[in-house]
């Protein structure tokens, strides 16, 4: 699957290194005697409304024009103009485009800056970077880019224009009217051969109607406001207006590329690319049978094969992209032989192996990273960036990640690429998303399951002994499940053991100064979807002894792992919460000669999206402290922000509250 | 931000390439035989818990004509899924005229069966292409990688021979055997020399066909740690270089080098009538040498725009139009220059005023710790101006923005400086500014409400190196971003804090302290129970974690410079509450290295509380500590944290209950 991504840090580091050393600027800048093109002059002359001081730059123009020829050739011209308002806006003085080395041809890529003095500088060919897509072993997609930030003083206008020719495998385009920046004019134009027609769908706002002139269509929006970043907010792609366009050749004539008028059509097309790749030979079939030899149930067979698919190294090699290669997995037998592949390779390998043991399954296209990205109203393969699997299961198999397909029946959804999430669970960034079951005519766009908060759970138990001098000895055990376990597992598996221990030490010492950790024992029960962590530590001065008579300590010994920082008073966007739950039980054996003088008041907060409570109890010389949290998840409207903020503030305050012991 | 980047940046690119370009084999050689014990290995031998371990890492450096051929060979045993992920794909970046050839790779399963990587599995890609420059890479994925297998690969790298080549001896996984075979370049007039850093010196063994070899066994993985010395100061590596005399006495070398530097720079400090006039104008009525030099220093700062400083206000347009200054007079006339131009102008003005300025060459403590016993100027990359005043040498660096008169960049303080001289160049240690020179001075006037909210006005002032650090972080940012930086820093400690009326002063001022002033409101600052409020009076340390949270330490502990903190916090207490206890945490001393003092007073008849706190560290120039002293050092900072976290109790009076 082709993933639209930005340059990785590693590559950026290289570029930065080159930039700083001046290596890539092989020629001295030659200002003067340059002029900006008329369209850029015109954009520069647009009057922009006053912006908040936090707006780093303003997009004066954002425009893409596409011309489609009858033979399927597509010429895309993109123009943009940005005015830098603050030093932080300098980074906006940049342009980049993706192109395919196999089928695409970049006809031009130009950029200019108009300095506050009016002087124009044109960026020559020497200053255009041509970059590989990072992290892939190989990818035919490349990036051309100009980074003019270092030359863009405040007030500078940066403009760019690029033209690329290609032969798309699709008859669809999408256009984001803006990114985060305020945008004065945003326009998407599509010129089709005579008699052809186009249809557009608008996301995140009311429909934008095109201006139609013959076979040319133009969608335009003006004066789009700045989209401010806020914690736990929806992604910009779910706030900024977006356009999706499909075009169709003249009635009765075959088009140059695949057209999709329904999700079934998308399914049929993807099925035609992938079905033949689920190859099976003796070696692969035998491996599947060997893996499942001891499995007693359908679920155990799926587990065994799922585990194997996840263990295959993730390696991305993208070729033939311009001919649909981005959607075609490598043959399962080939992937098995090399023991590596990308997401679609892994899902396809698993599909072939399941077939070998008599289980039917289907590839599933999904968007990884934002469950609200894919929209039902635009049937298009271009909405996806990831591939997972749906396994047809009988009634005997139970799991929270089963959906019911109208004709195929019960489907267990699983992601063989995410090797932290076992069968029976689904990565949180895929839960609730629309995804396409690739099943020929039966293919359908379906809402992926959302696991309940109770399944994504962290339970913590701590037993502590507090001494009269304030020192403490603690045994702590955490048990997590679902996506909470995935977080724990990711931290554990992502680090070398010594580094993991340091992470645990940092976590403990953040709440207990000078803690000496005597035991860190993680147990990863991946197949059960659980993770356990035992930690033991001591601290010499956890409780503070005051005037020799008061001993004060916080029963919430260690912090929760997750933090939601909703501290701003004003909120513009909705609040997005993931479902999870948490419980903690702390037993503190109190020192002889001390009695509890005060405990914090119990807290009970309830709202539609969650509940939190704390309880303190003294029994048999022990303090029992319990806290429980459940966040049901969902998207809370911005006008209810005060409630959400208040909820988390009360929770945070409760966790800081101390218990006071008095010497008898 | 002052970009003081020179040749080091170039070498950074090469070092990057070399780091990846390491495993190897003899030219044309086949795979080496596999030891059955390696196939059967179940656990790493060099470091327990390693995800993968290199059994062999070999590089053959064969210098011929104008090319040097590096034949790399690496064999790695995989133990865990993480090892599989990390070692399963390989990318070998290279640039310029370097060529990569003859890549071969294979996977050996525990049963000895071998899966060769196919030739077409190697991809040739251009990572970055711009202006005729390309950074390319060969990339490939090894087949059938899983825990238990051995992966091995080899390639040849052809590059132009270089006078200096850095070779790494440590990887991010442990290595059983690192072996370099080196054939010295035959046509150089100078002999090949080897210097090892951060480990035992590796003896060179004579080998066949004119090769020598260097072998290191059981090299642990390299891991970064916070507050460690610069990486090149702790990571094991060696430098192969060609120098005039392999047995040269360092003293003699530096003597000659210091003379050469003097001869090179003397013409660049030339005095003419304009310089004399400017010098006299700058000095004015000043008579004491110290005073004269300070005026010249400030004159250079005030009159010359520093184009090495991105925040100097010089626009890109002006930078592009700027011509090169050939002498101090050019710098003076144009009113613009690089950091080097400004330092040379200062030297020239000082000379015109009757001083005898010398260029002082220095190393950079952020790169490596310079050792004068190493007779080569490879690590002596920067300079400032040295002038003898009275009995001692004084050092000046007006070309670096924000560095106060009398101080140097922290990277150059406490460092060996080679003072160039036509007769007797000499090494002198530059002074390390004492803690009082780099102060964080905080004051707060606050009011505590009965619900635990703390609110009031705050001022934080930074001087010395702390001021330089804050100015460099902020000077290129917009006022809004500077406020955001402050807000982020406060919220990291106190998540509920709200700040307003922010004033950030002297961000780009070369001399004055960097100052924050703001109003703050922190709901739930103090914790409330039924009848008490619990308050941490050390407001400026609230929410800070301990400096050293982990128990294990591998590398030395390194503080860039000594510093001092002084806080004064006045808290008006809520009506209806009285101090239940106001005992202060005890002071402590760390010999002469550091000291902590806190005074806590109840004032205004118990209506308010005053905290006076001071802490300094790095006294006596103690800023580098061996790893063996980590436990003691951790204890010091844990104690500091614990005392700063000290809480006092306010009790509700009976009438308020």
Image (spheres, coloured by chain):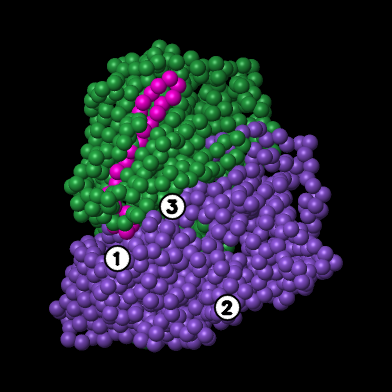
**On screen, A592 above or below A41?**
below
> What colour is chain B?
green
Q: Is residue B77 magenta?
A: yes
Q: Secondary structure at mark 2?
A: helix
**Image coordinates for residue B568, horizontal then vertical, percent:** 41, 58
- The residue lying toward the viewer, choosing from A316 and A337, is A337
Q: Among all residues in the image, which is located at the extreme right?
A: A214
- Residue B54 falls in which quadrant of the image? top left
Q: Position of residue A141 (x, y in %)?
A: 58, 52
From the viewer's perspective, tell me whether residue A291 is left or right of residue B539: left
Q: Which circle's residue, 1 or 2, is located before the other in the chain? A: 2
Instruction: Please give the range of residues in magenta.
Output: B61-84
The numbered mark at residue B441 is 3
Q: Secondary structure at mark 1?
A: helix
Marks 1 and 2 in Cβ contact (< 8 Å): no
Residue at mark 3: chain: B
Q: Which residue is mark 1?
A: A508
Within the magenta stretch, is there residue B356? no
Closer-to-camera residue (A660/B148): B148
Asked whether, in this view, residue B333 is left or right of residue B182, the answer is right
Residue underneath mark 2: A441
Mark 1 Cα-neighbour bin, 10 Å: few <14, some 14–19, many ≥20: many
Which quarter of the figure is the N terminus of chain B placed in? top right
In the displayed structure, A236 sits above or below B40; it is below
Which quadrant holds residue A536?
bottom left
**What subunit carries mark 1?**
A
> Which residue corresponds to the image point at 72% horizontal and 65% vertical from the top-left?
A255
Q: Nearer the viewer, residue B653 or A250?
A: A250
Secondary structure mostly seen in the magenta stretch: strand
């Amino acid at each position: 699957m082709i993933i639209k991504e930005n340059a990785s840090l590693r590559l950026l580091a290289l570029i930065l290194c080159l930039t700083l050393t001046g290596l890539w600027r092989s020629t001295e800048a030659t200002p003067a005697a340059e002029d900006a093109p008329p369209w850029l002059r015109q954009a520069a002359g647009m009057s922009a409304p006053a912006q908040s001081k936090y707006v780093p730059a303003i997009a004066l123009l954002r425009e893409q024009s596409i011309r489609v020829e009858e033979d399927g050739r597509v010429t895309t011209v993109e123009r943009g103009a940005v005015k830098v308002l603050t030093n932080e806006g300098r980074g906006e003085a940049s342009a980049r485009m993706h192109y395919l080395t196999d089928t695409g041809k970049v006809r031009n890529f130009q950029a200019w800056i108009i300095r506050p003095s009016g002087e124009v500088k044109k960026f020559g060919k020497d200053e255009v970077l041509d970059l590989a897509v990072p992290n892939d072993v190989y990818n035919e997609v490349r990036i051309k880019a100009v980074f003019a930030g270092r030359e863009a003083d405040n007030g500078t206008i940066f403009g760019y224009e690029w033209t690329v020719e290609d032969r798309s495998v699709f008859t669809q385009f999408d256009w984001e009217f803006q990114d985060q920046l305020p945008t004065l004019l945003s326009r998407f134009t599509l010129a089709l051969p005579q008699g052809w027609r186009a249809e557009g769908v608008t996301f995140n706002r009311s429909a934008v109607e095109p201006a139609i002139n013959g076979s040319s269509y133009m969608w335009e929006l003006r004066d789009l406001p700045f989209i401010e970043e806020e914690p736990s907010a929806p992604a910009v792609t779910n706030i900024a207006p977006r356009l999706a366009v499909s075009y169709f050749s003249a009635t009765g004539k075959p088009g140059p590329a695949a057209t999709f008028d329904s999700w079934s059509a998308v399914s049929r097309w993807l099925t035609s690319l992938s079905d033949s790749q689920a190859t099976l030979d003796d070696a692969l079939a035998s491996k599947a049978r060997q893996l499942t030899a001891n499995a007693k149930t359908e679920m155990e067979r799926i587990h065994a094969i799922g585990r194997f698919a996840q263990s295959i190294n993730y390696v991305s090699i993208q070729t033939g992209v311009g001919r649909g290669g981005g959607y075609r997995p490598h043959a399962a037998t080939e992937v098995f032989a090399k023991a590596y592949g990308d997401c679609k390779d892994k899902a396809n390998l698993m599909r072939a192996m399941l077939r070998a043991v008599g289980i039917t399954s289907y590839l599933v296209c999904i968007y990884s990273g934002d469950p609200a990205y894919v929209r039902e109203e635009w049937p298009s393969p271009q909405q996806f960036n990831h591939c997972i699997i749906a396994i047809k299961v009988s009634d005997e198999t139970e799991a929270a990640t089963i959906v019911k397909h109208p004709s195929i029946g019960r489907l267990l959804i699983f992601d063989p690429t995410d090797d932290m999430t076992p069968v029976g669970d689904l990565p949180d960034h895929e839960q609730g998303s629309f995804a396409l079951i690739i099943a020929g005519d039966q293919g359908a766009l379906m809402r992926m399951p959302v696991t309940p908060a109770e399944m994504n759970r962290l339970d913590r138990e701590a037993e502590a002994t507090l001494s009269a001098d304030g020192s403490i000895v603690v045994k702590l055990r955490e048990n997590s499940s679902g996506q909470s376990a995935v977080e724990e597992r990711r931290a554990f598996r992502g680090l070398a053991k010594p580094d993991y221990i340091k992470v645990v030490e940092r976590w403990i010492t953040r709440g207990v100064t000078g803690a000496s950790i005597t035991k860190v024992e993680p147990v990863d029960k991946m197949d059960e979807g659980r993770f356990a962590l035992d930690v033991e530590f001591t601290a010499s001065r956890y409780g503070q002894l005051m005037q020799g008579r008061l001993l004060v300590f916080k029963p919430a010994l260690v912090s929760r792992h997750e933090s939601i920082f909703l501290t701003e008073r004003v909120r513009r966007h909705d609040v997005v919460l993931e479902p999870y739950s948490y419980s903690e039980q702390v037993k503190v054996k109190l020192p002889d000669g001390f009695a509890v003088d005060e405990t914090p008041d119990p807290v009970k907060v309830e709202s539609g999206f969650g509940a939190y409570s704390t309880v303190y109890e003294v029994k048999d010389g022990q303090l029992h402290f319990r806290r429980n949290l459940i966040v049901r998840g969902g998207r809370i409207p911005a006008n209810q922000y005060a409630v959400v903020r208040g909820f988390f503030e009360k929770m945070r305050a409760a966790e800081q509250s101390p218990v006071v012991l008095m010497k008898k | 931000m002052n970009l003081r980047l020179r040749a080091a940046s170039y070498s950074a690119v090469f070092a990057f390439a070399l780091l990846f370009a390491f495993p190897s084999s003899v030219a044309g050689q086949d795979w080496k035989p596999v030891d059955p014990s390696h196939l059967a290995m179940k656990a790493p031998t060099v470091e327990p818990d390693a995800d993968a371990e290199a059994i062999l890492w070999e590089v053959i450096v064969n210098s011929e004509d104008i090319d040097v051929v590096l034949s790399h060979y690496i064999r790695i045993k995989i133990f865990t899924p993480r090892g599989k992920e990390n070692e399963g794909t390989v990318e070998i970046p290279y640039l310029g005229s370097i060529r990569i050839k003859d890549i071969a790779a294979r996977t050996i399963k525990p049963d000895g069966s071998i899966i060769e990587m196919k030739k077409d599995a190697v991809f040739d890609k251009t990572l970055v292409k711009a202006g005729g420059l390309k950074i390319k890479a060969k990339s490939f994925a090894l087949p059938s990688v899983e825990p238990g297998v051995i992966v091995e690969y080899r390639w040849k790298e052809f590059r132009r021979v270089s006078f200096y080549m850095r070779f790494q001896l440590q990887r991010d996984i442990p290595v059983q055997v690192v072996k370099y075979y080196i054939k010295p370049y035959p046509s150089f007039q100078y002999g090949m020399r080897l210097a090892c850093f951060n480990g035992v010196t590796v003896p060179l063994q004579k080998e066949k066909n004119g090769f020598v070899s260097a072998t290191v066994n059981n090299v642990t993985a390299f891991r970064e740690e916070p507050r460690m010395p610069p990486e090149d100061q702790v990571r094991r590596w060696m430098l192969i270089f060609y120098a005039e005399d392999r047995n040269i006495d360092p003293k003699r070398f530096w003597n000659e080098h210091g003379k050469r530097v003097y001869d090179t720079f003397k013409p660049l400090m030339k005095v003419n009538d304009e310089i004399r006039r400017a010098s006299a104008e700058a000095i004015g009525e000043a008579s004491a040498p110290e005073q004269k030099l300070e005026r010249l220093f400030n004159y250079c700062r005030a009159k010359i725009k520093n184009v090495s400083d991105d925040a100097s206000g010089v626009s890109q347009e002006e930078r592009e139009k700027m011509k090169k200054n050939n002498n101090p007079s050019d710098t003076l006339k144009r009113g613009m220059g690089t950091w080097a131009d400004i330092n040379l102008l200062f030297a020239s003005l000082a000379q015109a005023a009757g001083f005898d300025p010398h260029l002082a060459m220095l190393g950079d403590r952020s790169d490596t710790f310079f050792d004068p016993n190493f007779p080569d100027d490879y690590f002596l990359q920067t300079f400032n101006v040295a002038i003898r005043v009275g009995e001692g040498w004084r050092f000046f660096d007006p070309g670096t923005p924000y560095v106060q008169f009398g101080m140097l960049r922290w990277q150059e303080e406490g460092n060996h400086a080679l003072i160039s001289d036509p007769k007797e160049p000499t090494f002198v240690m530059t002074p390390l500014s004492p803690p009082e020179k780099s102060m964080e001075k905080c004051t707060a006037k606050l009011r505590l409400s009965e619900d635990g909210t703390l609110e009031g006005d705050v001022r934080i002032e930074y001087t010395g190196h702390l001021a330089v650090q804050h100015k460099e972080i902020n000077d290129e940012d917009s006022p809004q971003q500077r406020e955001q930086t402050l807000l982020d820093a406060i919220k990291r400690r106190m998540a509920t804090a709200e700040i307003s009326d922010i004033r950030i002063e002297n961000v780009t001022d070369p001399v004055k302290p960097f100052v924050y002033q703001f109003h703050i409101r922190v709901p739930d600052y103090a914790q409330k129970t039924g009848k008490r409020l619990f308050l941490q009076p050390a407001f400026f340390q609230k929410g800070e974690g301990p400096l050293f949270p982990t128990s294990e330490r591998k590398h030395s502990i390194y503080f860039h410079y000594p510093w001092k903190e002084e806080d004064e916090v006045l808290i008006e207490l809520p009506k209806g509450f009285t101090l239940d206890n106001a005992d202060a945490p005890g002071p402590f001393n760390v010999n002469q290295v550091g000291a902590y003092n806190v005074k806590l007073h109840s004032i205004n008849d118990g209506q308010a509380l005053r905290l006076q706190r001071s802490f300094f560290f790095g006294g006596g120039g103690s800023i580098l500590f061996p790893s063996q002293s980590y436990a003691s050092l951790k204890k010091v900072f844990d104690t500091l944290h614990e005392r700063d976290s000290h809480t006092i109790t306010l009790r509700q009076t009976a009438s308020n209950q």
